Image: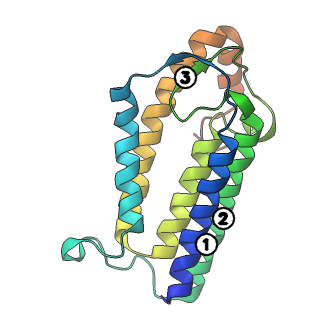
Amino acid sequence: MSAIYQHLIGALWLAWVITWSLLARNAKTTLRRESPSSRAAHVVPLIIAALLLALPTLPGNFLSGRMFPHALATFWVGAVVLAAGLAFSVWARVHLGRNWSGAVTIKRGHELIRHGPYRFVRHPIYTGVLMALIGTAIARDEWRGLLAVLIAFAALWRKLVLEERWLSETFSEEYAKYRAEVRALIPFLL
C-alpha cells in the first residue's frame, strides 16, 4: 500500500480526534464517576486495539498475513466504512450534547437521549467506533485487525454493561422501556 493510502486512514482518525476534542468542551457537572481501575479496564484494551491497527509492523510479523485477496478496492471499502463509522459516532456525540463523558458517569441534570442515532441503537458512539475500527482493519488487511476489533468490542461491551446498569438505576422504568424498544449496538440484532 502506498504512503498516501496509509496517511488517509491516519488523517481520518486525526480529524475525528480533533472533532471529538472540540465537542468535549462544556460537559455537565459529574455527579457519579466510575473508578480509575474500572476506566482502565476498558481504556487499556482499547489502546492495545489501536496499537494493533496503527503500528506499521508487529514483532515477528505476528498476525501480519492478509485477510483478503490483495486489491485496491479492499482498501477503499475499508476507508468508506471507517469514514461512515466516524461520522456516525460524531452524529451521536452531537445529539448526546452536554451529557457526554469519556468515562462512565452520571451528570447533574442527566437526560436520556432518544433522538438522532439514539433512535436506532442505545450506544451509537460505540457502534460508530466499532464500525470505524472494522473499516480500519479492512483497509489494513491483516489478521491483527480482526484481533483489534475483537479486543475493542470486548472493552466497549464491558463499558456498555456498566453504563446500562447506571442508566437503569437513574432512569428506571423509562430506561427499561427504551431497552425493550431499541437494541444496544446493532439495530434489530444486538
Q: Are marks 3 and 2 in contact (CB under 8 Å)?
A: no
Q: Read off the residue under disc 2.
A: 83
- Residue at left 36%, top 69%? 55
Task: Please tell me whether mark 3 sits on a helix, a strand or a loop.
Answer: strand
Q: Are marks 1 and 2 in contact (CB under 8 Å)?
A: yes
Counting every numbered tag in the picture gives: 3
120 w.r.t. 32: above or below: below
60 w.r.t. 187: above or below: below
Specify the amino acid type for callout 2. Ala
Task: Please tell me whether mark 1 sits on a helix, a strand or a loop.
Answer: helix
Q: Read off the residue under disc 1.
A: 79
Q: Read off the residue under disc 3.
A: 105
Q: Is residue 34 left or right of residue 22?
A: left
Q: Specify whether residue 37 is in view.
A: yes
* Residue 188 picture quarter: top right
- Front one among 38 and 76: 38
Q: Is residue 163 left or right of residue 94?
A: left
